[in-house]
Amino acid sequence: EPEVTQTPSHQVTQMGQEVILRCVPISNHLYFYWYRQILGQKVEFLVSFYNNEISEKSEIFDDQFSVERPDGSNFTLKIRSTKLEDSAMYFCASSELKVVTGYTFGSGTRLTVV
Amino acid sequence: SQQGEEDPQALSIQEGENATMNCSYKTSINNLQWYRQNSGRGLVHLILIRSNEREKHSGRLRVTLDTSKKSSSLLITASRAADTASYFCATDGTNAGKSTFGDGTTLTVKP
């Protein structure tokens, strides 16, 4: 069964450093998303991306965040200057259609900011 | 209460019993999804039910949706120890693709 692949599975970074989280969505999917889950809290929407541009973003997705699809397969989330409160599990997801039949989530990247 | 709230927060049952989890939401939805998450792992999409559907089945899973009550239920029949996980509902409003997740129900199935 097709999978959404995320790398790395765990990243530790110093506060103030930039991190790039990588995702390879399912190949025929057109819509891509990032969510995050702070330990013990709800999964929260960050951003959706379609046709090489952001479709929608939440209030969490401020200027320190950016997304990119640098080539035909990767979808990245960059956090420019990490803060302690950015420590969370970050999930990438993709879907085939806008009127979805379902989303496929990756297994997540656990980001720890120290 | 917030969009996509599950109850109970925790459920403990014996293997072979049925588990029922409920989800309530506040605003109009396009669809509602249920996910499973094993501790510290990724989200596994279980089932999506559209706002014009009332019931859906997938294997041992049965999901109902009552849009008049703004609620959904997930029934897992003949539970197994491997079903032990957290279960989340998530709703898409008019902006499909921006899912709002609930707090989840932690299910423990004792062998």
Image (cartoon, rainbow, N blue to C red):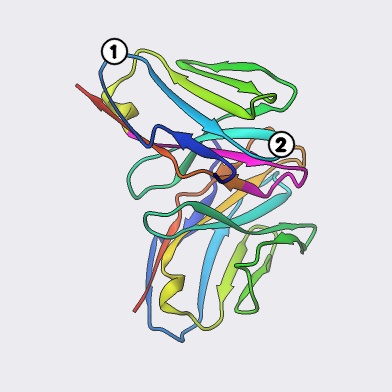
Foreground residue among B99 and A24 = B99
Image quadrant containing the C terminus of chain A: bottom left
x 56%, y 81%: residue:
A80
Given the image, on which type of amino acid does mark 2 rest?
Answer: Ile
Location of mark 1 (residue): B16
The magenta stretch is: B85-99
Q: Is residue A26 visible?
A: no
Write down the chain letter for disc 2: B
Q: Which mark identifies residue B29? A: 2
Image-based side of A55 in relation to A3, left or right: right
Horizontal and vertical percent position of residue A13? 39, 78
Q: How crowded is mark 1: few (under 14 residues within 10 Å), some or many (20 or more)?
A: some
Q: Earlier in the sequence, mark 1 or mark 2?
A: 1
User: Would you say residue B52 is visible in this rendering?
Assistant: yes
Can you say whether B107 is above or below B20 in the image? below
Considering depth in this image, is B42 or A46 the residue closer to the camera?
Answer: A46
